[in-house]
Image (cartoon, grey):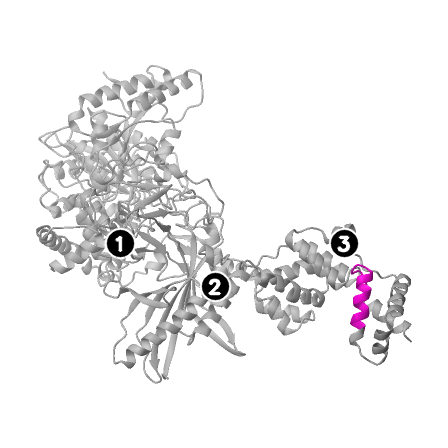
Amino acid sequence: MAIDLNEAKKLAKLSRLEFTEDELKKFANEFEGILSQVKAIDKVDVSKIDLKESSAKILATKLREDIVQASFSQCQVIQNAPSKKDGAFLVPITVDEEGCK
Amino acid sequence: MSDYNVVIGLEVHSELNTNTKCFCSCKNEFGDDPNTHCCPVCTGMPGALPVLNREAVKKAITMGLAVGCSINTHSVFERKNYYYPDLPKAYQISQLEYPLCVGGHIDIEINGKKKSIRLNRIHLEEDAGKLIHDNEGTLVDYNRGGVPLIEIVSEPDMNSAEEAVAYLEKLRSTLLYVGVSQCKMQEGNIRFDVNISVNKDGEPLGTRTELKNLNSFRAVTRAVKYESQRQMDVLDDGGKIIQETRRWDDNLGKTFTMRTKEDSQDYRYFPDPDILAIDVTDEYIESIRKTLPKLAEQIAKDYVSKGLSIQDAELLTLRKEYSSYFDEILKYFDEPKFVCNWITSEVFKRLNNQESEDITIPVSAENMAKLLKMYKNSEINQAVARQVLDEIWQKDSDPTLIVESKGLKQMNDTGAMESVVQKIIDENPKAVEELKAGNQKSMSFFIGQAMRATQGKANPKLVTDIVNKLIK
Amino acid sequence: MSYLDLSLREVRDLLVKGTVTSEELVRECFDKIKETSDLNALTSTYFDMAINKAKEIDLARKNGEQLGVLAGIPIVLKDNINLVNTKTTCCSKFLENFVSPYTATCASKLINAGAIIIAKANMDEFAMGSSTETSAFGICHNPIDKTCVPGGSSGGSACAVASKQCFGALGTDTGGSIREPAGFCGVVGLKPTYGRVSRFGVVAFASSLDQVGPLTRTVEDSAIMLGVIAGSDEHDMTASLEPVKDYTIDLDKGVKGLKIGVPKQFFNEQLKGEVREALIKALDTYKALGAELVEIDLPSVDTALAVYYILSSAEAASNLARFDGVKYGVRADKYEDLVDLYYKSRTQGFGSEVKRRIMLGNYVLSSGYFDAFYRKAKRVQLVIKKEFIEAFKICDVIVSPTTATPAFKIGEKMQDPVSMYLSDIYTVPVNIAGIPAISIPCGKDKNGLPIGMQLLGKHFDETTLFRVANAYEKSTKEGK
């Protein structure tokens, strides 16, 4: 089962990671090895499995109560910001709703 | 003239008016300095975990029941993964496969014609933070991040801008009546996206485009009209509609490409492992159904049974604020028709004259009831009632004290009134002649004169009776 | 004899008696830390904070105040556990300078019980690895043989306990990251039942698999530490409401009448050499102690590794997406615009193993592959879990080697990710099934490298695990 360079590029985009062509090729090769291991799940019979039945559940009536607790101070919230201004995080001008490259 | 059908579906996001955010106990509040209602959870700090708000789930279910949805007894939250600075975890916690509510409908009426718009689903999710553009860059404020939202998705059942706006009006009214949202558009409590396509009769549905950045009902109307025309023009020219998201520019009155399907994100939805599946029992659903607040239609029916006309009942239930106010006044002064007439005339007039879109009535229900009581009991006349209303509209206070201190009480003393009227009759023989000749307008003259003589405190009806008696 | 040679419980007894002060213990630990700095087990140390806390506790003890169960005991935290106002780096360049604005629940619980946090421990970057070789702050060395790895990802924690730099440590375990290093370093490492310990404040790797657990010198110490950190948490929906027991209560009950399950899939021809010998010997010890050995069948257990890599990578890809250079962590120096900021910051900040897992995770989640990989893996996970539950109907605990070989050489497996992944074969099924498991030393190879035995228990039955583990530990120690 192969993963070609184009697929690798798409994954890099989804991951927001930059690779050189060589790095991507190396990655694609390693990937093949990993994916062949991972295919082991194909042989298991899952026909009797109902995911809904078995997921851990919580009653809607036992969820967190809607009571305000003290928030963190503005200082604490932005203390690790690489760049900040007027109590907010500062980033370059954003263009679109969802940053695509 | 084109022979196209316009097909519209709407996605509305409404913030819920819970005390705290969806997944943490930070305050759910608009305004305030940036990043002052935040914690590790809503700012996506490493190691933070979401904890679901019970009230948010309850409000979502309440809205669902109010519009006829069925409630999923097994509901799952999923991660919608994408990168944007207003999304601190780089995923939004939302719902996909098992939303809290499915189905439902919103009924609208246009020019007397009724139509039921089907809903696809209502699900619960969290809001993103806010971006403020600056000359140095973009500032990110996470105060709004994590606020609970319900997303209400309609089926593409609307066929005109009018229907779309009627749907939105009705939806907003319902949200207010059910009490789950403030619906203040200027605070971003409610936002809408429009999906629109065109097709000719008999042909399959056209390719749709999604319109974003619509900030008012007026914008929806204009955008729908523009985009449907744009699509028709493209098709008439032999072109194809590209499935894409377009941004509405209110200044230019046009839509522009924002992103195409090729650019579109792969959100890689999967159930959020930090949040257990929600078990909504039938008992719980029923307990919520029992406490469902009455909706506009039911309240209007109640008003009709109190003696109001259908039109008046609908006017009063147009906004929850109006009907609540009306109900509150009735607690102090139980004269439904009288109160209704006053509200629909004097109060609505003053609200319409205001600069702002604010529909808060500045007079407390109790004070308004006192004013109306005095008016109904003839303690003051209409002119004085209006005058006092002006005063307490500026500064809410007890109208009985104003009437007392300014001596505005209507003169109801027949004896005293008779002497005043007699004097006017004696001084105005010509008017008496006209009145005797059957000119009823002259009566206004006598009333006017009586008002002048008594500094506006004359009782018009009493004056009329006395004039008629004395001129015989 | 140094106090550092004692177990946590033994030194606690001396503290209570007044034979030693907490301040003395802290000083001894720091002397040892200095002595063993070449092992590179720790990323930050807190001498001043620790001494001050120690003095406070010594004074309180002198005044007869009520003190917690771990009062005055020096403990180390893995560097993916948030501790307010200290750096929590996850041994990644990305978080090199990240200062925690809050404290993890498990750490708070230790502190409330009087423990003194003296340092943060080295680890594989973002907990992804089995050797602590992917740490951005240098490799950690196995204290028994410095040319070998200490295991991972909690290698620093295991090393610190084994080399007596502290009396106990917290690690995290997603696929074996507490047990494998415990086995390689010759200490006791417990992964509690999933949900037994709150994950709030622990930097997430794979949310449905991660658990925090203790690394200690003895089984008893492990039971003491679990008792402190276990329990529900209003900040973690996945932390179980199951009541916390006194985990020390059955320690000395012995194993007579208990059934120990021996999976045929674990004791096949793949298990060889000295590790096989050590395990067989251990099983004989158990028989001698009165336990019954029962063969059990876990037919799908060999797919656990595949399930693990699919689920853990998917969750990791999503959990690590928040590291984008906007709110904290590394931000690239040069970037053209916002989008470029994301790419450059992440590419600069993450190591190659982390990048590999993120890519794999996005692959299995991407549309077109989601059903075949992620959803299918979730179903296979349930099959594996059911097989364990079935097996536990006829036994009380299950036994296996912790790893197929003792600690390997530094650099030996770094070139081949697949062979690195295979070191998790015995530990990974435990995380997939959500059950608890403990690794205890059961001998050494001819080079003196420790061999680990793993005991697997029923959900929320750590008590039986401790009982069975303690029986072995006591018998072999007494034998010395």
Q: Are marks 2 and 1 in contact (CB under 8 Å)?
A: no
Q: Position of residue C254 (x, y in %)?
A: 30, 33
Residue B377 located within the stretch drawn in magenta: no
The reply to whether residue C263 is visible in this rendering is no
B416 to the left or right of B102? right
Q: Residue at x 24, y 30 (%)?
A: C473
| Along the line of sight, the residue nearer the viewer: A18 or C275 | A18
The chain letter under disc 2 is B
Mark 1 → mark 3, Cα distance in angstroms: 80 Å
The chain letter under disc 1 is C
- Residue, disc 3: B403
* Quarter of the rendering containing residue C250: top left
Mark 2 → mark 1, Cα distance in angstroms: 34 Å
Mark 3 crowdedness (10 Å alpha carbons): few <14, some 14-19, many ≥20:
some
- Residue, disc 1: C381
Please state, as top left, top right, bottom left or bottom right, where the C terminus of chain C lies in the image.
Answer: top left
Residue B444 located within the stretch drawn in magenta: yes
The three-letter amino acid code for the residue at tag 1 is Gln
- Residue, disc 2: B64
Magenta extent: B443-459
Q: Which of pointers 2 and 3 lies earlier in the amino acid sequence? A: 2
The residue mark sitting in front, 1 or 3, is 3
Residue C310, compared with residue C118, is above or below; it is below
B417 to the left or right of C369? right
Q: Are the residues under badges 2 and 3 in a single subunit?
A: yes
The residue mark sitting in front, 2 or 3, is 3
| Along the line of sight, the residue nearer the viewer: C308 or B126 | B126
The three-letter amino acid code for the residue at tag 3 is Val
The chain letter under disc 3 is B
Q: Position of residue B468 (x, y in %)?
A: 87, 73
Tell me the element at label 1: helix
Q: Are the residues under badges 1 and 3 in a single subunit?
A: no
